[in-house]
Image (cartoon, grey):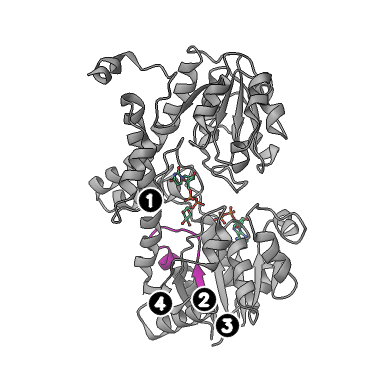
Amino acid sequence: MVIKKVCCIGAGYVGGPTCSVMALKCPNIVVTVVDKSRDRIAQWNSDKLPIYEPGLDEVVKQCRGRNLFFSTDVNTAIKEADLIFISVNTPTKTSGNGRGRAADLKYVEGAARMIAEVATSSKIVVEKSTVPVKAAESILTILMANQKPGVTYQILSNPEFLAEGTAINDLVHADRVLIGGEDSPGGQAAIEELCWVYEHWICRRNIITMNTWSSELSKLAANAFLAQRISSINSLSAVCESTGADISEVARAVGLDSRIGPKFLQASVGFGGSCFQKDILNLVYICESLNLHEVATYWQQVIDMNDYQKSRFASRVIESLFNTVSGKQIAILGFAFKKDTGDTRESPAIHVAGKLLLEGAKLHVYDPKVEHEQIMEDLTHPSITEEPEEVRKNVVLYNDPYSATSDTHAIVLCTEWDEFVKLDYRRIYNSMMKPAYIFDGRKILDHEKLEKIGFTVQTIGKRLSRTVVPRAWASIVQV
Ligand code: UDX
Ligand code: ADP
């Protein structure tokens, strides 16, 4: 079979950018991205795409209507496709067995059932969404149980490694592409078909093939390793704050060891995003199901440390503001889980803002890309507050950082947007109440300069000159 038509079920953060780049690099393949959400598809077909991703607009403009199509006609796209990507959401279950840990596969199952119902010719079905190990088996079971005469299926695992904010570059210059499939002639042939698609722009030696379960587990493992590095450096940031060591210096020293390397050692308010926490929870759940309790406990610590870091940062803000933020005006700069995305899933800003609201603070929130409705939705979510109406009264959303910070007691920086580095902090200082505080949760600002302007500055993993040393530590530090 030569792949002529590809269908992608799910036009989200994974399916949209991945298929746009595929269409760009494979002009001989027609790529149709389908979604059950009419709004989402309408946005993909408009000038304002549903997700903000640097470089994505240009790619979509170049291919849309040529060999890239966005549609709600799921049935036709499935019917016509040789190869189908499943890129639907796999959130953590919120109820029932495995609640709070296991991945909810209802959307994956829904997509598999749709394929089974509609397909009239043989298909290669590729799981792209992050799924628990052995999900491919479940998809195959559903497809085989509903198989029509003459229709065969091959299931492949092809996990996505793009990071939001750098997705286009990650897709165009992928470190590696992973393809897992069955160790049978049919399975190997399907792997070759998908390799052929990627070989349009990825060099063959960077396309790794393996068995399906290894591929599924590799995706969880890669995210667990990355998150573990952040939790490790964040754990040491707490030691730095208490001793006078500087986490940036420690990270630099450690990262210069070529066995360790410098990436993912940036201490922060905590990691967020739709993948890290979900994937580790998934790994923990699998380990528990396999009676590997020690392994489960080991990985759970990566999440626990992240929760500790988010809480620790919020507590420091409260303690520094004379142990009460009740009625105080606090500006939250940045709400996305990282810069260059409008995505707020698991954003540490939600946790920090939620804790400040619980203590009675009045928040002024500004983010360059996150939609206002999204911020309100996140802060009024039942997991954050029992009093959504109170939250609505105590949160004001702004379209520019100067209005957001004016007349506030403190600034809490939660996302490392480049524009925050370039702000006129003297102007901001003059408009704030005094003493004026800045809590830099991303370590991106020029702290010395801010102190010279008059700010009291606190950051992660470093004690600045005006930072008060907790009493318990003072004697140790003097020694
Ligand atoms: C991640 C993986 O990197 C990607 O391969 C996978 O496909 C999906 O999950 P993503 O969540 O989009 O990508 O972004 P990433 O750059 O990994 O950042 C995740 C979180 O870690 C962000 O909140 C980021 O701010 C934080 N982070 C990252 C740090 O706190 N310190 C670092 O050194 C790096
Ligand atoms: P991700 O970050 O994994 O891409 P998103 O939530 O951004 O996740 O996108 C997943 C998309 O999948 C959503 O737009 C959702 O509407 C879509 N989706 C889920 N189930 C189906 C389905 N059965 N058919 C079509 N689209 C679906």
Give the magenta-colored segment's residue range: 124-138
Mark in front: 1 vs 3:
1
Residue for badge 2: 198
Is residue 160 placed above or below 470 in the rendered structure? below
Residue depth check, mark 4 versus mark 1: number of the one nearer the observer: 1
* Residue visible at 45% across and 22% down in the picture: 315
Neighbour class for label 2 at 10 Å: few (<14), some, many (≥20)?
some
- Mark 3 surroundings within 10 Å by alpha-carbon count, few (fewer than 14), some (14 through 19), many (20 or more): some
Q: Is residue 457 left or right of residue 21?
A: left
Image location (x, y in percent) of residue 41: 71, 59
Say which residue label 3 marks: 3
Q: Residue at 52% x, 60% y: name it.
A: 108
Quarter of the image holding residue 311? top left
Instruction: Reply above or below: 461 against 345.
Output: above
Residue indicated by mark 1: 262
Which badge, 4 or 3, is on the more N-terminal residue? 3
Separation of marks 4 and 2 at Cα, in angstroms: 11 Å
Amino acid identity at mark 4: Arg
Reading the chain from its start, which is encountered first: label 1 or label 3?
3
User: In the visual, does 277 lie left or right of 471?
Assistant: right
Which callout, 2 or 1, points at the residue further toward the start of the chain? 2
